[in-house]
Image (cartoon, helix red, strand yellow):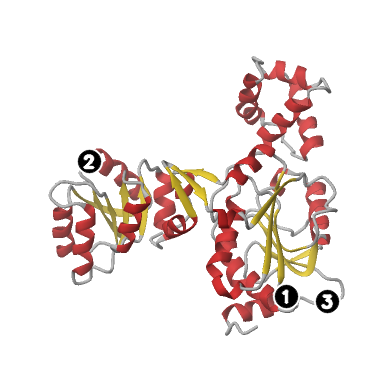
Amino acid sequence: MKHCLVVDDSSVIRKVARRILEDLSFSITEAEDGQQALEQCQQHMPDAILLDWNMPVMDGLEFLGQLRKLDGGQGPKVVFCTTENDVGHIARAIRAGANEYIMKPFDREIVEAKFQEVGLI
Amino acid sequence: MTPAEYDYLRQFLKQRSGLVLSNEKQYLIESRLLPVARKSGLASITALVAKLRDPRESMLADAVVEAMTTNESFFFRDKVPFDHFTQVMMPAMLERRAMKRQIRIWCAAASTGQESYSLAMCLKEMGSKLAGWRIEIVGTDISNEVLDRAKAGVYSQFEVQRGLPIQMLLKYFVQNGDQWTISNELRSMVQWKKFNLLESFAGLGQFDIVFCRNVLIYFDQPTKADILSRVSKTMTPDGFLVLGAAETVVGLTDAFKPVQDRRGLYAPNVPGQTAAAPTPATRFAFGSGAA
């Protein structure tokens, strides 16, 4: 079973994402900000990370930069999932090493399509 | 809706568009046609049918056909056909048309344009390999309403997130709030035309590649066979036909034969010629690419 880390400061979003991804046969862990996510990745590198942008303590973009520098940090497929929906943000995320990008609001079909796109399904 | 009204609508749709509805599609009619009725100030399907019987109501008749035949479309829908396009069809065509340097592609049920624009993106991704080539994409559909949307090339945030890789979105679209518009460069690669598959194909010209996906399912067997046989006559003998994931030519027509190991891909059956088409294409797809 593939492991997906869901990183979002909203518990509602985490719950929705968890439900969708569990249906797609992922095992899920959660983090509330980039710092927590980074600590989890240092313990155990997931296969996939669904990543919010704006979060307290450490935001998604900074987390991504740190992740890619970790040993094995190139491994996880990172899919941003954020309300930041302008070309500038998307381009920055891709340059920083994101594999895909979901603009909120999202639904089951979009998550499935994007995870398929990066070869996770 | 009374059984007589349902029968009338079934007959009307079969005649106008070839659409065949089975016995129990009342829910589909209601969900699609009630909005049409209300738009025309009619309270019910009964009132709509009464008005449809008036031959002067051609606008209403068009609206009914459009509402019943319009279907959802996605960028790179089903993915596999687009892999076939870049890995099999285009390499074969680059080889076979090396002298003429011209390829014509037909999207026979273009809907809101996603399939045609996906092909245009595939072509752009091939880059300099196509320098000096003239490649035409013709998108046709029975519905003016969807063709207007295809021409405009404006898609919602939801539509651009189903099947379209984010890199392609950045490369080929211009953002306007939460709407995304296909770039002028891509838009200029496709010609749009209102066209009913039941009518004569004369005037469309000859095609090397035909995408005819998820439209035959709406027709009865004889109509399917007739359309496929006429499609084969609009095609170059060494061309390719792509059908939808749930569609096949098997048992319908001898005009096409399946391309081996390429689901949904067919080649015209040229009398007196054995299945020569797939082999060079497959070889070429994984070969050196020297034309």
Q: Which residue is mark 1?
A: B97
Q: Are marks 2 and 1 in contact (CB under 8 Å)?
A: no
Type of the residue with mark 3? Gln
Type of the residue with mark 1? Arg
* Cα distance in 3D space between marks 2 and 3: 64 Å
Choose between B163 and B13: the one closer to the eye.
B163
Q: Position of residue A41 (x, y in %)?
A: 18, 62
Choose between A70 and B180: the one closer to the eye.
B180
Q: Chain of mark 2?
A: A
Q: Dot 1 lies on which element? A: loop
Q: Chain of mark 1?
A: B
Q: Are marks 1 and 3 in contact (CB under 8 Å)?
A: no
Choose between B206 and B256: the one closer to the eye.
B206
Figure check: B7 above or below A79: above
Q: Counting other residues with Cα less than 10 Å from the Cα at mark 3, is it few (<14), some (14-19), or many (20 or more)?
A: few
* Cα distance in 3D space between marks 2 and 1: 56 Å
Q: Position of residue A34 (x, y in %)?
A: 17, 53
Q: Chain of mark 3?
A: B
Q: What residue is drawn where x is 61% and y is 24%?
A: B35
Q: In the rendering, which numbered label is found on residue B273?
A: 3
Q: Dot 3 lies on which element? A: loop
Q: Which residue is mark 2?
A: A10
Q: Position of residue B99 (x, y in %)?
A: 74, 79
Q: What residue is drawn where x is 63% and y is 75%?
A: B91
Is A7 left or right of B193, judged from the image as shown?
left
